[in-house]
Image: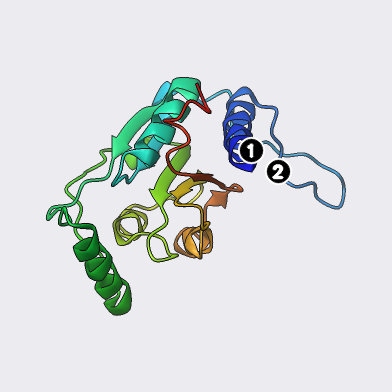
Amino acid sequence: MKYVASFFLIINLAICILSGCANAQNSSAEKKESLVDKESLTDENILIVYLSRTKNTKAIAEIIHENVGGTLVELELENPYPENYREIVDQVADENATGFLPPLKTKIDSIEKYEVIFIGFPTWGMRLPPPMKSFLNQYNLSGKTVIPFNTNAGYGIGSSFETVKQLCPDSKILEGSSIKGGIERDGFFL
């Protein structure tokens, strides 16, 4: 049940951002400041980027897209991962150990036009997957509102959300949401 609440929290937060009801933390003078300029926010200013091996993260990205609009983009690699799960685990462990960032086939034109960027990914080895690290290293998200969302097999986010904060130091990182993969297909969100 906590997964359903977590998911609806991210959807409600996104809707609040887009409708202007979300506010940044109050300053000592209790001045409230909007997280995004709602007047300039349009369907063209929202980007939803996701990485999905088993289609769980894709399903959540599509639900977010249905609720807030925007551009939906799946990260693809120049050299796709092997189909065999064990081989992927070994390759990702090697990439994490060496700091290798796999080259992306996916290209996003005019990233500067987006104000709100949802980034979705599974937990791999209790870390942010190397392809998402590639994306965050390749594109400058300074000044943008970044909303992470995660799917996992029930063991959580690991260090992934902290890594997003480290790779986007000049972005407004909102509290992310983590969902046990598969429940979106079992009808919990339908």
| Residue 77 spot, x, y in % from top left | 18, 51
Residue topped by disc 2: 24
Q: Residues within 10 Å of mark 2 (few under 14, many from 20)?
A: few
Q: Evaluate whether residue 100 shows in this view.
A: no
The secondary structure type at the circle numbered 1 is loop
Disc number at residue 19?
none
**Tag 2 or tag 1, which sits nearer the N-term?**
1
Which amino acid type corresponds to the residue marked 1 in the rendered image?
A: Met
Observer-nearest of 171 and 161: 161
| Residue 88 spot, x, y in % from top left | 23, 62
Q: Evaluate whether residue 118 shows in this view.
A: yes
Q: Residue at x 43, y 64 (%)?
A: 127
In this view, the residue farthest toward the front is 186
Disc number at residue 1?
1
Q: Residues within 10 Å of mark 1 (few under 14, many from 20)?
A: few
Q: Residue at x 22, y 68 (%)?
A: 91
